[in-house]
Amino acid sequence: MRRWASDYAPRVIDELDRRTDLASDLTRRARAAGVGLIWRAQARRTSRVLVQSGRAEETGVSTASGHGVQVVTPEGYTALGSRDDFDPGAAANLLDRVIGIAAHGPDLGLTRVPAASSEALRARDVPEGLEAFERLDLEAARNRLIDLEREIASRVEGVTLRLAFGTDLDGWRVVRDDGTDVTFAMPRCTMRMTASNEGSGDRHSVGASVSGPLPDLPWNDATVAKFLERALAAARLATRLPDAPNHPSGSFPILMDYALAKGLAHEAFGHASEADGFRSSILAKDGKFRAGDRVGPAHVSVIDEPVRGDHAFQPFSANGVRRRRATIVDHGHLKDALTDAWTSASAGTSLTGAERAESFRSAPLPRMTNIRIEVDAPIPAPGAFEDYGPEEVRELLASAGIFRRHPEVVFLSGYSGGQVNTVTGDFVFNCKSIYRLGHSGATLYKPAIFSGSMFGALGAIREAFGPLALDAIGTCGKWGQSVPSSGGSHWFVFLEPEPSVRLGGR
């Protein structure tokens, strides 16, 4: 079993460890000026390989580092600044300028928002094995992707393939004037494939991916086997979609896979529970989180928390607070909001340490990490998720007696983006494919819009099948910042027909 602690410091962490004197000097200056300080330093190493048609279209490594200062006056005015270097003199000048800006908060029209206090913390979370990022052979990775592309192409004709492999080692250090000093690394790697059908008809692109914390994905036998299963299924689907009919619009009994369930949890309940939006969120009233209100059935919960080794794992917040589990919906009732030091008091909820930042230049915002829908007493599903094509899913529903209630079920597979209006709770999602499942078999339809009310969708959840799968990955955008996201649910989640939840089409 891999241990998640090590005395080895990769270059991105060593870069941060060497800035103790700078952090101490800035802290002394802030204390002398009578202001609070949050100092954030970041060092990052990324690599990317992209291949198509047997050749590399992109191969490269990039590094970046810098630091940002955030000051808080006793009156509650906040200002931020950043630099792309660690020059001590320039850093001191930057801090002085930011202190001056915060001091003129009333004249500049800044909003006065006192921050909630949190316990001083000194901690370090640097996973073992990160030296693999520095030893990565990009030429070997390129050749491996070319081999995988060749294998997929030999088994599925009529598609154009693009394969990508990326690694990201993101190191952070957060120091506060109260003695807090936390250092952590967030390693994430992905291997992706996009298959597009060839020909003169409608063009459809279908993707597949796997992720992990270390850059051994292209050579890990179990990971490659899973990737090939997903990639081959996606490539075959891309060839079939142009000839598939459009599905009728309306409300139907719906089965969604865990990727689409993650989209529902993330876009609908996740963003609506971020406390910086509570002046208009449907989950708040008069700026306060509606904790205790019933929003769904008693067997359904929505949970966000950092999952170690996950694509979006972050053990500490961008303010140096240990991130904790947030049960947004606890068996049908609202419980926890995603809060930071500036929003927990106004939201009337506890501090969950949910603040994340894209870079040291960014202002931290309450954000999700790994979010999921959990259903009590899920129905067992044997084997692995990749074993379930539409026919196997149909047999699973039949064995559970679903077709005794509904002669046909609409199966939505895959998540390809969406958005939610957090004021009204209305969402619009896109899926990758639609299947009509019934006693007679499974029929493929073109993807269509899945839309409705977040409360209606949550309330319609009746059953779930299989264990939790939490590796549906993506990128979450908010206020111009993008951060990794992930999550899921049980393999499949069943929704009874609900008038406020509709499937588009012709």
Image (spheres, rainbow, N blue to C red):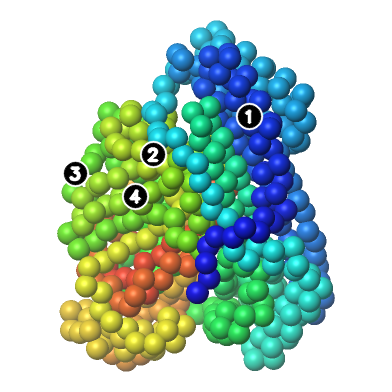
Q: Assign a secondary structure to mark 2.
A: loop
Residue holding disc 3? 292
Cα–Cα gap, marks 4 and 2: 9 Å
Q: Nearer the viewer, residue 499 or 277?
A: 277
In front here: 185 or 505? 185
The residue sitting at 23% across, 41% down in the picture is 291
Q: Which residue is mark 1?
A: 24
For mark 4, does the 10 Å Cα neighbourhood hold few (<14), some (14 to 19), or many (20 or more) residues?
A: many
Given this view, does label 2 or label 3 mark the residue nearer the observer?
Answer: 2
Comparing 242 with 466, the one in front is: 466
Of circles 2 and 1, which is in front? 1
Give the mark nearer the N terminus: 2 vs 3: 3
**Residue to which mark 2 is pinned:** 339
The span from disc 2 to disc 3 (Cα, nearest Å) is: 17 Å
Mark 2 in CB contact with mark 3 (< 8 angstroms):
no
Q: Secondary structure at mark 3?
A: loop
Circle 1 packing at 10 Å, graded few (<14), some (14-19), many (20+), is: some
Q: Nearer the viewer, mark 4 or mark 1?
A: 1
Q: Disc 1 on helix, strand or loop? A: helix
